[in-house]
Structure formats: C-alpha cells, structure tokens
Image (cartoon, rainbow, N blue to C red):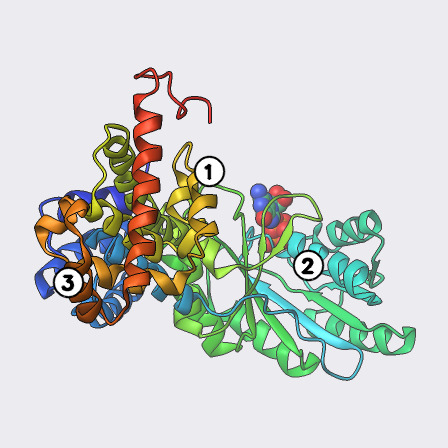
Amino acid sequence: MFETLQERLGSIFNGLTGRGALSEADVSAALREIRRALIEADVSLEVVKSFTDKVREKAVGATVLKSIKPGQMVVKIVHDELVEMLGSEGSEIDLNAPAPVVIMMVGLQGSGKTTTTGKISKRLHEKRGKKVLMASLDTRRPAAQEQLRQLGEQIGVATLPIIAGQNPVEISRRAVQAARLGGYDVVMLDTAGRTHIDEPLMAEMAEIRHSADPHEILLVADSLTGQDAVNLARNFNERIGVTGLVLTRMDGDGRGGAALSMRAVTGKPVKLIGVGEKMDALEDFHPKRIADRILGMGDIVSLVEKAAETIDAEKAAAMAQKMQSGQFDLNDLAEQLKQMQKMGGMGGIMGMLPGMGKMKDQVAAAGFDDRTFARQLAIISSMTKKERTNPDLLKHSRKQRIANGSGTNAADINKLLKMHRQMADMMKMMGGKGGKGKGMMRGL
Ligand code: GDP
C-alpha cells in the first residue's frame, strides 16, 4: 500500500508547533518526502525535479494558515502547483475546422489506441451529433482493420471499407476522400503502434500527418506507463507534434504520475481519460482529481480546508465542557466570539455543538450580526483581567472607562453583559440538570 504524503509529512512536522512562515529547512524536509511520493506515483525524475524546484520557490516563506499544520500547508501548496501543472479542465476535442475534421490517433501498441478511437467516435456521435468515419491505418497487424470494423458495428459508427494491399498513407487519403464524399463531419485515423518508439514508426506517422493534415493529433498513452511516458511524449511531440493527450487505464491502480510527466514535457493538455474497456468508459480530465491521486489522498484540498474547522470544533467541544460545569466568564465569551468570527459567523461554532441550536437562536435574537463580533471583542479586551472573570464588578464608572477604551457606549456594554448572563445561565441549567448524560445536552 502507498503511504500517503500526509502521513509522511505528518511525522516530519510533528515536532514543529510554531506558526508563521515556512522555513527553508521545513520545506527541504518536506520536499524530500514529496519527491519520494511523486516517484512512487510514477512521475518521471526530470519532471519531479522541476516540480519540486517550483514548489520550493513558492513554499519557503509562505505563511502557515492559523488552524492548519505546517505539513498540511506544504501539501496544499504542492497540490495547487500540481493542479496548475496538470493544466486546465475540460479541454474538449477541437472540431473547429472545415469538415471533414481529421483526428489522428497515435501511440504505442497496446496503449488502448483502437479502443479509444472507438470511444471518442461514439462520444462525438452521441454527444456532439457528429457523423464520424473511422479508418484503421494499421497494415502491419492483419487483424487490426477487422478489429476496428467490428468495433464500428458495435457502436454504430461507420468504418472505411477495407482494401487489401494499401499502405497507411493511401488508406488515410482514401479515408479523407470518402469522408468528403459521404458528408462526414469527422474522420478518425487509428494509426499503427509499435511496442517501442523507433524510427520507422516515427517516419510513418510523419508521412501520414503530412498527407492527412489532421486538425487534432491525440497521443494515447497507458497511464500505468511510468518513467517511459516522458520519452514517449517528447518523441511523439517533437517528431509529429501532438495537440492533446489521452490517458488510458485510469481505472487501474496506478497513481497517474504519467499525466503530469507528459503534460509537463509536451505542454499539451490531457483531453480525456479512459477508465475501462467498455465503449463509454471515457471521461473528461479533471486536474484536481489527478492531483489528489498523485498525492495519494482522497481529497487533500477539502482536507486542508476542513482542518481549520476540525481544530475549531475541538476547541468548541472543550468550551462546551467548561460551560456545562458552570464556569463561563467573559474570557470564554471572547473566545466564543472569536471562534464565531473565524467560522463565518452565526452558522459556525454554535451549530456544531450538540444542544447549541437554542442558544444560537437566542444570540441571533439579540441582534447579533457578524459585524458586532468585532465590537463585542473590543469591549471585552478593554476590561481588566478581574472584570473578565467577575463581570459583577462592572458598575457605572468601570463601564464608562471600558466604553471609552473600546469606542462603544454603555448600552453596548449592557447588551453584551446581558447576553453573557443569559448564556451562562443556560449553561448552568444544562450542566446542572441531572448531571452526566441526563441534561438538556443529551439527545439534542
Ligand atoms: P492498441 O494496440 O493501442 O490499439 O490497444 P487496444 O485498443 O487494442 O487496447 C488494448 C487493451 O487495453 C484492450 O484489451 C482494451 O480493452 C484495453 N483498454 C483500452 N483502454 C482501456 C482503459 O481505459 N481501461 C482498461 N481497463 N482497459 C483498457
């Protein structure tokens, strides 16, 4: 099993409790783990290097959000950078050219080229209403043209009639001509593959490209291809020029690092991913999902976002316990107010505490909107320590002093004290009624 990056970083940053900016040393330690994780995810070495350099640049000196751990912060930076490098979402197949639009499929043997040709044809036909003609240019494997013909029959897409003895370029010319005459919108050219890249293959591809003048050249690659993905992508892109990538076998348990490598080397978008053998197992590419997968975690972004809430919720639980025991002074109220402010106001902390629904209503009824938090906090911070723990001390002259100090007035202070009293009373009632497990808290 893969160990998640989060777990690894967790142990690095365990000793690190300080907040503030990420230091060079923190980032270097984290990057060692990130490098390992990326290599395990099959990202090629050269891409790992350029990627970690970029992350280092962004991470050193970055401010750690208050409620998350430094490790999570680094993961978030890595994740965001991955998404950026993986490129934009939903890069459609471009059909913006005079019909028939020629789409040339290239890639190694066994990468899923023929299957993907069928999947894309089906999709263009069903989802975009296009009339599609498929042609196999694979003259080396005797069964290849027949395989495509059967596939076409299965999905209801026309295939170019087979004429024995023609070479790939001749077939491609015939396909384009037949498409023109038959009023087809799209011609899909399924080229031959090899088990590895060699010069004759590249020469053949270049020739087909020259004669068929494809509008899209899609490189089909097996996502389980590890380090080789980079060579593959570079070679095809340099020799033939590709317009997009399609990654197959994303239904397998590979980490998808090839997506990053190929994208980084070619700069071309991943347009689609294959997620099974069936003809409709083709999906749009979502960089976020692939980034999650490369990092080996469910959904790291929401994890980072949730981290803040989790920590607040822990504090809230501790607070609730304090309240139940009947100790709820103005320091506690201030803490509550800060939490509420941080969590986006009224819907926040109170709603997360069991049994707090009622109090939430009460606070809201007291005319408490998010803007008042700041004012209330200012009032409390203008009090002395003694006053905060014992609000009964607050008589007229003290109130005047606090009002002056906080830029408020006596009415504001009275409102705050009233709210505190109500909350404290309610807390006492909840805590006092029957003790453990029997109070109002239970079952609410
Ligand atoms: P080609 O030699 O590149 O044309 O490869 P094929 O299209 O013949 O596919 C080779 C094998 O991979 C076939 O058994 C396909 O069913 C399978 N295949 C293709 N794409 C996918 C995919 O996205 N997921 C899975 N699981 N299998 C796939």
Quarter holding the N terminus? top left
The answer to whether marks 2 and 3 mark residues whose Cβ atoms lie closer than 8 Å is no
Rendering coords of residue 128 (x, y %): 78, 66
Alpha carbons under labels 1 and 3: distance apart: 37 Å
The answer to whether marks 2 and 1 mark residues whose Cβ atoms lie closer than 8 Å is no
Nearer to us of marks 2 and 1 is 1
| Residue that mark 2 sits on | 117
> Mark 3 belongs to which amino acid?
Gly
Q: Is mark 2 within 8 Å of ligand 1?
A: yes
**Residue 307 seen in render:** no
N-terminal of the pair, mark 2 or mark 1, is 2
**Residue 416 seen in render:** yes
| Residue that mark 1 sits on | 358
Alpha carbons under labels 2 and 3: distance apart: 52 Å
Residue at x-position 30% and y-position 22%: 432
| Residue that mark 3 sits on | 20
Q: Quadrant of residue 273?
A: bottom right
- Disc 3 secondary structure class: loop
Identify whether 95 is placed above or below 262.
below
N-terminal of the pair, mark 2 or mark 3, is 3
- Disc 1 secondary structure class: helix
Left/right of residue 146 with respect to residue 355 in the rendered view: right
Identify whether 133 is placed above or below 319.
below
Residue nearer the viewer, 337 or 49: 337
Alpha carbons under labels 2 and 1: distance apart: 60 Å
> Mark 2 belongs to which amino acid?
Thr
Rendering coords of residue 38 (x, y %): 30, 54
Residue density around tag 3, few if under 14, some if 14–19, many if 20 or more, within 10 Å: few
